[in-house]
Amino acid sequence: MRALLQRVLEAKVVVDGQTVGQIDSGLVVFLGIAQQDNLKIGQKLIDKILNYRIFDDEQGKMGHNVQQAAGGILLVSQFTLMAHTHKGLRPDFAPAMPPAAAELLYLQLVDYAKAQFPHIATGIFAADMKVHLVNDGPVTFNLEVSTA
């Protein structure tokens, strides 16, 4: 499982002209789910995201996590993160979990994230989403977990 985190000043997801998820400052998390992933792996990744210290503390260092920074999380499914891109000129999406199973796991992870932290917004799984964000920094990190 892979998450691309972007620290933002604001962000929203728009589907068919309607805003479906929105946060002020916090994290946009693009989440890619691989075929071998499961709920335990996903929970480990969510826990890491919630505790990852990438917000400024009192000394101006990256010492606070999203919870300490009183931010929100916009969690967006993105199967393209799982693509193999090292060979050829077209991405290979074979490593990504099939859509039906990935949607079920994604929804379980959204529920888990909301149980851990109340400020969670989402996109819509498999929708044609327009993600608007103002990257703060820019600060972007790629997190991966593969075993629980």
Image (cartoon, rainbow, N blue to C red):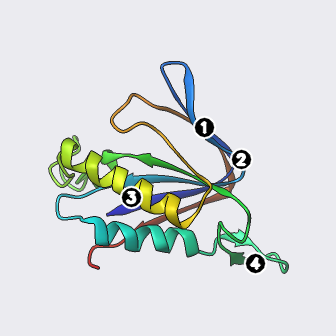
Alpha carbon separation for disc pair 4 and 1:
27 Å
Q: Secondary structure at mark 4?
A: loop
**Disc number for residue 109:** 3
Horizontally, is 101 left or right of 112 in the view? left
**Is 54 drawn above or below residue 138 in the view shown?**
below
Measuring from the top left, give residue 71's x and y in whole percent. Answer: 69, 59
Alpha carbon separation for disc pair 1 and 3:
19 Å
Q: Of label 1 and label 2, which has the lower sequence position? A: 1
Residue identifier under label 2? 24
Residue shown at the point (23%, 56%) measured from the top left: 86
Residue identifier under label 4? 61
Q: Of label 3 and label 4, which has the lower sequence position? A: 4
Q: What amino acid is at disc 2?
A: Asp
Residue shown at the point (18%, 53%) measured from the top left: 87
**Is 113 drawn above or below residue 100 in the view shown?**
below
Q: What amino acid is at disc 3?
A: Leu
**Disc number for residue 141:** none
Kindly report which numbered mark, 1 or 3, lies closer to the viewer in this rendering. Answer: 3
Alpha carbon separation for disc pair 1 and 2:
9 Å
Measuring from the top left, give residue 1's x and y in whole percent. Answer: 31, 64
